[in-house]
Amino acid sequence: MSAVISEHQVSKRISDPAYSKWVSKTFPALKGNIFLGSAGRGPMPITTVVAMEKLVKSWRMSITRDKTEDEITADFKKEASLLIGAQTNEVAFVPSTTFGINMFAGAVRWKKGDEIVICDVEYPANVFPWALAASLGGAKLVTVKSKDGIVDEKDIEKAITDKTRLVTLSHVQFGTGQKMQVDRVAEACEKHDAMLFLDSIQALGSMKFNVKRKNVAGMCAGGYKWMLGPVGSGILYISKDTATQMKPQCVSWTALDAEQRKEAWQKVVLGGDQSERRISLGKDISVFEAANECMVPEKGLTESVKFLRSLGLGNIEGRIHALNDHLLEQLDSKGFDVVTPRSRSRRAGITAFCGKKKFDSMDDEVQMLKELDNVKVAIRQGVFRTGVHFFNCKEDIDKAVSKLSKICQKRGLI
Ligand SMILES: Cc1ncc(COP(=O)(O)O)c(C=O)c1O
């Protein structure tokens, strides 16, 4: 890790010129932008980009698989497991959240009549894989309805019964920014012996989180948002207990060690034992990884997670809260309606808000984003959405709100 990072800490002051200077050096991609878009795609720290470049450059002079690749995998598992409080054999490298959720959903031994509880505000990536698995495995989806886009955890608790096999939840909702009360849902799942699965792409990298403390069966998060990794990277977690009860629908030869391969070969190929299912769960959940996957995104995500951990996830979470407290004050003062729950325990990096009227056409959204120019905020479900990360500062928020309010005033929206 470069000296710059070890010398620096996340500033407790939301306006701090020395800190902002460090941010500009560390994230050159932010140059020229008021970037509040980490809920879409986060910028990569320069150390991550350099590490990936170095790996690609090494291929100029080398064609063979060398031990660097095993080291990258081991390093990834170490960093990813430390980030979420898991064991190294409980994490796998995946190219996206969608991929990881499909792997998990396809591997559950569903029984006819099983119920999968979902909410009506989930991102499609956390809906369609479960719908497919349900249709193939005889399970059915039970949908919890939100009110004004906000999900009441009590309604999720009510939907969980002895028929519930699994509850899937975004840790932080992509549209409203609502941070779900994972503890409460985990408790209800435990009472009914159901699994809890988390889509944590809008959470990991922006907060402290421990999968064991919350009793989570599975979790997946793409690396390209709050974790500041490259597209094509992500972390899949499956608890050891859950994994041993699964029937993966895929098998990766690299997930078996030499001894296991020999044994499986003996049984399946030479012994003709087609019922040998154990080949599909090898030494750990690497069975869900592509064999000989491209190492560049894996290296990149590992470097970014290392970087975030060196800064401290608690410090990052604290700064994000302080910045969003300021953002809420600013939005209130300009007359915007805030959609995101206000208490710190029910929000994280995302803040959603709107004027008197929601956007109801794509053309309108495109025009608004064009006018906002270098102010990078998103429009989701008809409302503005910001994703404020630890590298942002008070001035970013002030400039963004000032521009937003000018445009919205002109249009009679506030
Ligand atoms: C909550 C949530 N889940 C999943 C995704 C998509 O993840 P991926 O592209 O890694 O499959 C998004 C993207 O915005 C998201 O917000």
Image (cartoon, rainbow, N blue to C red):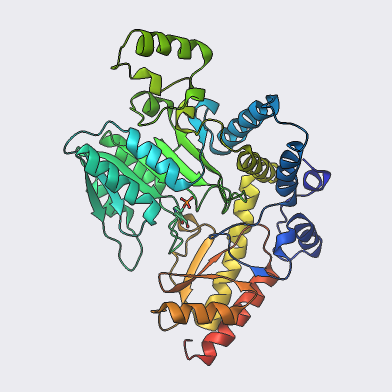
Q: Residue at x 27, y 30 (%)?
A: 109
Q: Is residue 298 left or right of residue 95?
A: right
Between 50 and 379, the one lying in front of the other is 50
Q: Is residue 304 above or below residue 79?
A: below
Q: Is residue 115 visible?
A: no
Image location of residue 184, percent across then percent down: 36, 45
* Residue 174 visible to an observer of this rendering: yes
Estimate the x, y position of residue 333 in percent, counting from the top left. 55, 81
**Residue in the picture at 80% in, 61% down:** 21
Q: Residue at x 49, y 50 (%)?
A: 201
- How many numbered marks, from 0 up? 0
Quadrant housing residue 197? top left
Quadrant in the picture for the N terminus: top right
x, y (%) of residue 6? Answer: 79, 43
Q: Is residue 140 above or below residue 195?
A: below
Q: Nearer the viewer, residue 364 or 198?
A: 364
On the picture, is 143 further left or further right than 203? left
The answer to which image quadrant residue 51 occupies is top right
Q: Is residue 45 left or right of residue 245?
A: right
In the displayed structure, 308 sits above or below 144; it is above
